[in-house]
């Protein structure tokens, strides 16, 4: 499992490693100048290869081989996996990785700016945040007013440690972020803050929705041929400290039988933040929990006929397919966390608040998918571009901004 809680010894070992690597990197940053068109990519704090960083890197390796591009992994296992697929990779806490980062003139992150450590500020270096998702829920830790603030002495000391040894860059250093529509742009600006420009380019992670050959070779589950795939992808609760989202229909024998009769497979994919709190995972022949299989969310959406979610941005990506999208608001998340805008007017037939309402939406979506699918107007509201050119547009925007080409 990639998302595990560290014990005291593991945490001390990590801090000592970061002190050593951070010190070495600080020195090398003074000695080694950046090299033009040397780009490093990171996602999910280096723990997994996904999100827009993944897909832009793949685009660069395929279309711009004159650039020196590589992924920065947090573990040797991930590095080995990527290299077995022909994808250049280094580990963050290695001399080779530190040198690679020191040489980089462009740093690309998607989960957070500390997807890559030791990419300290220096002359000629630019930072690009590709966004973890489209803006919808209010993430208190992401809003500018809350960013990098801590009221406790321990928190302030950890922030100082991170600044000195791991990173001295954050959102205010980002050159621009990619947006998908004029409607979403101001909401993205609110989340990012610091006056960082938003450029409507689309999001690279969705380009592969159109690449069927690529998706066929990505990790997926067996035994889904001919089945209707319904996937439930809720967001986290209290950043992983809340209650794990219950699996719908776990105790509803009648609904499970209906799934069998209609050749439906119901997939449950919890948010990664919730994994350390998951216990008694439920799966059977018609309901399958795929959380710990570590399948790329974009791949999951590609294979899904119907997507169920709540305050996650996954349904907004899923709009590109024009397939039924169901919102299941089973708890009081909106009162405790909040959303940036109201999706209910855009999805009037697919809003649910109970398991009974959820099943009714599923039934209608299976029997009348056209009636339950988003309209062209709704898709256009959230996506100016519905194509596989977002990586190309993003690349051209970076080159124009950074190299004046």
Image (cartoon, helix red, strand yellow):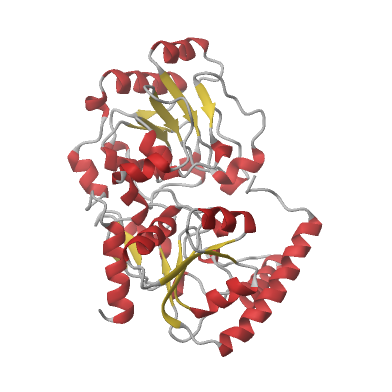
Percent coordinates x, y for residue 383 in the rendering: 25, 50
Closer to us: 355 or 296: 296
Split into 4 quadrants, where in the image is the N terminus?
A: top right
21 with respect to 391 (left or right):
right
Q: Is residue 163 above or below residue 236?
A: below
Percent coordinates x, y for residue 155 in the rendering: 68, 65
Choose top left, top right, bottom left or bottom right for residue 158: bottom right
Q: Is residue 200 visible?
A: no
* Outermost residue, left side: 377
Percent coordinates x, y for residue 212 in the rendering: 31, 42
Taking the spot 66% from the left edge, 42% from the top edge, the residue there is 276
Q: Is residue 296 visible?
A: yes
231 with respect to 279 (left or right):
left
Taking the spot 52% from the left edge, 11% from the top edge, the residue there is 253
399 with respect to 173 (left or right):
left
Percent coordinates x, y for residue 373 in the rendering: 26, 31
Q: Is residue 124 above or below residue 77?
A: below
């Amino acid at each position: 499992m990639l998302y595990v809680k560290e014990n005291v010894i593991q945490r001390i070992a990590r801090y000592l490693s970061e002190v050593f690597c951070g010190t070495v990197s600080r020195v090398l940053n003074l000695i080694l100048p950046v090299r033009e068109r040397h780009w490093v990519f990171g996602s999910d704090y280096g723990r997994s290869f996904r999100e827009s960083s993944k897909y832009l890197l793949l685009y660069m390796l395929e279309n711009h081989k004159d650039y020196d591009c590589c992924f920065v992994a947090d573990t040797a296992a991930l590095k080995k996996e990527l290299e077995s697929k022909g994808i250049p990779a280094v580990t963050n806490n290695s001399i080779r990785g530190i040198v690679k980062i020191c040489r980089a003139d462009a740093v690309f992150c998607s989960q957070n700016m500390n997807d890559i450590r030791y990419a300290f500020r220096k002359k000629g270096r630019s930072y690009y945040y590709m966004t973890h998702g489209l803006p919808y829920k209010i993430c208190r830790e992401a809003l500018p007013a809350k960013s990098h603030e801590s009221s406790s002495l321990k928190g302030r000391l950890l922030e100082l440690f991170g600044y000195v040894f791991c990173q001295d860059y954050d959102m205010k250093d980002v050159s621009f972020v990619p947006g998908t529509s004029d409607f979403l742009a101001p909401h993205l600006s609110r989340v990012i803050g610091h006056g960082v420009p938003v450029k409507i380019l689309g999001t690279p992670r969705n380009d592969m929705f159109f690449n069927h050959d690529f998706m066929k070779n990505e990790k997926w589950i067996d035994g889904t041929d001919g089945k209707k795939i319904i996937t439930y992808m809720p967001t986290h609760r209290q950043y992983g400290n809340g209650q794990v989202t219950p699996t719908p229909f776990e105790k509803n024998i009648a609904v499970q039988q209906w799934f069998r009769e209609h050749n439906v497979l119901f997939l449950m994919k919890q948010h990664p933040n919730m994994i350390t709190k998951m216990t008694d995972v439920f799966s059977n022949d018609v309901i399958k929990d795929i959380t710990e299989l570590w399948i790329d969310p974009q791949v999951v959406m590609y294979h899904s006929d119907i997507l169920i979610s709540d305050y996650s941005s996954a349904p907004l990506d899923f709009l590109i397919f024009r397939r039924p999208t169901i919102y299941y608001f089973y708890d009081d998340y909106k009162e405790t966390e909040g959303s940036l805008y109201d999706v209910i007017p855009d999805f009037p037939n697919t809003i649910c608040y109970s398991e009974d309402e959820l099943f009714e939406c599923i039934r209608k979506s299976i029997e009348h998918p056209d009636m339950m699918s988003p309209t062209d107007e709704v898709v256009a509201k959230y996506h100016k571009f519905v194509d596989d050119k977002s990586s190309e547009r993003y690349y051209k925007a970076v080159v124009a901004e950074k190299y004046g080409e």
